[in-house]
Structure formats: structure tokens, C-alpha cells
Image (cartoon, rainbow, N blue to C red):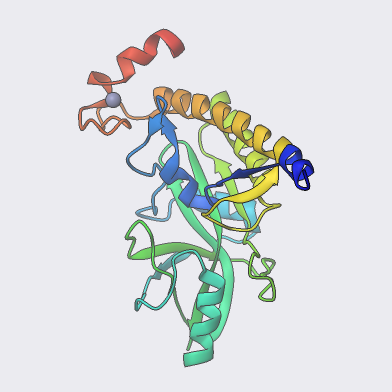
């Protein structure tokens, strides 16, 4: 058969895209979590400034309003900002959008906004319905406009010193290293069988670590990550005690 070689070396898989979106599909107790644990921070804490210093050597972090007029796609911030500047002037500013998983980690996602007359604004709509983004400029971030599959980087910084948070970040970094080889896509694509197996194994590890992180760090009086609407302490936490307690 002509394509048997391809069949033994490649597999059609669907990768969730990188960055914050990956938290929309994370598992808790083996099921999709109904919400993303990372959020736009409500205010700029000293810990956020410290994390910004660590990631890009700057603590010039501030909120930028999202002014989306319906003509831009949510996962194409660099192209959106470029198109906007071509229409209205100003310049594209690269940096990081900062999200926070309370007590667990900061999620830094490469992002592009527009600067016009000294004011920053974001034209890229948020999938989560956010009205503003916490943004820190970083001139070292580059985007290859010639390459439609070009990705912006992302980085995670632990807040908690717990070992399972450290392990979770390591696993996610390894997943990113593999996924970065492939184009941004939500449809099926051909990847090597080794990569598909490695991703499956790492995602299995990630699910176990996410359960552990939730077990130790999700506030007991807040709603359970399973989406039942009940307090964590009256829902899944007692059942997880045998595994982690
Ligand atoms: Zn529950």
C-alpha cells in the first residue's frame, strides 16, 4: 500500500490550542471542568509585579480595555492588531496577557495590542467574555507575520510552592514543547505517533496533577470544580481524601 508508511508513522489527532484556552478543556476527576480556573486578575498585586519581572524584566503592567467590534477573531491577536493599525494608525505592541489561577499560578500568554496616541487598547475579543486584559509590554516578543501558523509564546509562573504545582508546570511545559512543532489548529492534523503517544501520556499526568492541585488548593467553601454547584467540601473533596489526604 502506498501510504502504509504514513499510517505507521503518523496519527490524526486534534490538539487543543495552547495558552489560556487549554484550561477550558482541563479535566477534574476525569471530566471536563465547566469553567477555566485562570482569570483576569482583579487588581495588580505585588506578586503579579514580581512574576512580570521574572518573565520579562518589567513590572510596567496595567489593564487594557478590550474594544472588539466584531470583525476580529479571538485567537489571532497579532494579525488583529496589525489590521487595526493599518486602518486607524498607531502601532502594534507585543507583550503578555496575564491570567491568575488564585493561589496556584500565573499564566502569561503572548499577546498583541494597539497603541494609538499614547493609549493602549486590545481589539481581540475574549472567548471568556472578559472586558479587559492585564497586559505587560515585552519588546523581545516577535511574531512572524509571513507565517500563518506562527505562534506567540506562553509561560506559567507558580504562586504555590507545593510540589504538585511545580510538577504540573513541568508537565505543561513538556506538552507545549511538543505542540509548538505543529500549527495552531482546532481540526484534525497529522502528527508523529511518538508525539501523539507522548501527549496522551503527559495529558494523563496533567489530569492527575490538576486533581491534586484542586484537592490541596481549591478553597473548600467555594463551588466544586466538578460543576455541581455545591461547596467543594460537601461535594468531591471528601471522596478525593482517600487518594490524596
Ligand atoms: Zn464536585
Is 211 placed above or below 239 here?
A: below
Q: Residue at x 50, y 79 (%)?
A: 114
Q: Residue at x 69, y 76 (%)?
A: 146
| Residue at the limit of the structure toward the left, as seen here | 230
Using residue 74 as the reference point, say whether residue 138 is left or right of it: right
Using residue 163 as the reference point, say whether residue 41 is left or right of it: left
Closer to the camera in the image, 241 or 55: 241
Q: Quadrant of ligand 1?
A: top left
Using residue 169 as the reference point, say whether residue 102 is left or right of it: left
Q: Quadrant of the N terminus?
A: top right
Is 146 placed above or below 202 here?
A: below
Q: Quadrant of the C terminus?
A: top left
Residue 153 sits in which quadrant?
bottom right
Q: Residue at x 40, y 40 (%)?
A: 102
Instruction: Specify whether residue 166 is in view.
Output: no
List x then y, in percent, for residue 91: 56, 84
Closer to the camera in the image, 217 or 149: 149
Amino acid at each position: 500500500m502506498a501510504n502504509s508508511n504514513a499510517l505507521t508513522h503518523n496519527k490524526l489527532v486534534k490538539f487543543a490550542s495552547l495558552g489560556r484556552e487549554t484550561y477550558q478543556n482541563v479535566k477534574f476527576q476525569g471530566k471536563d471542568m465547566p469553567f477555566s480556573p485562570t482569570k483576569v486578575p482583579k487588581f495588580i498585586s505585588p506578586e503579579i509585579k514580581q512574576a512580570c519581572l521574572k518573565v520579562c524584566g518589567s513590572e510596567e503592567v496595567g489593564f487594557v480595555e478590550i474594544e472588539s467590534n466584531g470583525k476580529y477573531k479571538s485567537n489571532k491577536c497579532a494579525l488583529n492588531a496589525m489590521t487595526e493599525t493599518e486602518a486607524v494608525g498607531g502601532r502594534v505592541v507585543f507583550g503578555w496577557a496575564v491570567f491568575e489561577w488564585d493561589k496556584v499560578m500565573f499564566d502569561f500568554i503572548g499577546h498583541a495590542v494597539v497603541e494609538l496616541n499614547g493609549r493602549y487598547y486590545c481589539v481581540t475579543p475574549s472567548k471568556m467574555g472578559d472586558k479587559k486584559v492585564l497586559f505587560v509590554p515585552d519588546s523581545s516578543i516577535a511574531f512572524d507575520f509571513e507565517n500563518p501558523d506562527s505562534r506567540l509564546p506562553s509561560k506559567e509562573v507558580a504562586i504555590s510552592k507545593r510540589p504538585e504545582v511545580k510538577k504540573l508546570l513541568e508537565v505543561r511545559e513538556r506538552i507545549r514543547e511538543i505542540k509548538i512543532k505543529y500549527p495552531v489548529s482546532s481540526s484534525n492534523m497529522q502528527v508523529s505517533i511518538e508525539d501523539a503517544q507522548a501527549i496522551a501520556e503527559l495529558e494523563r499526568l496533567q489530569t492527575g496533577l490538576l486533581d491534586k492541585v484542586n484537592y490541596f488548593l481549591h478553597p473548600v467553601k467555594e463551588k466544586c470544580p466538578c460543576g455541581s454547584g455545591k461547596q467543594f467540601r460537601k461535594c468531591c473533596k471528601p471522596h478525593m481524601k482517600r487518594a490524596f489526604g
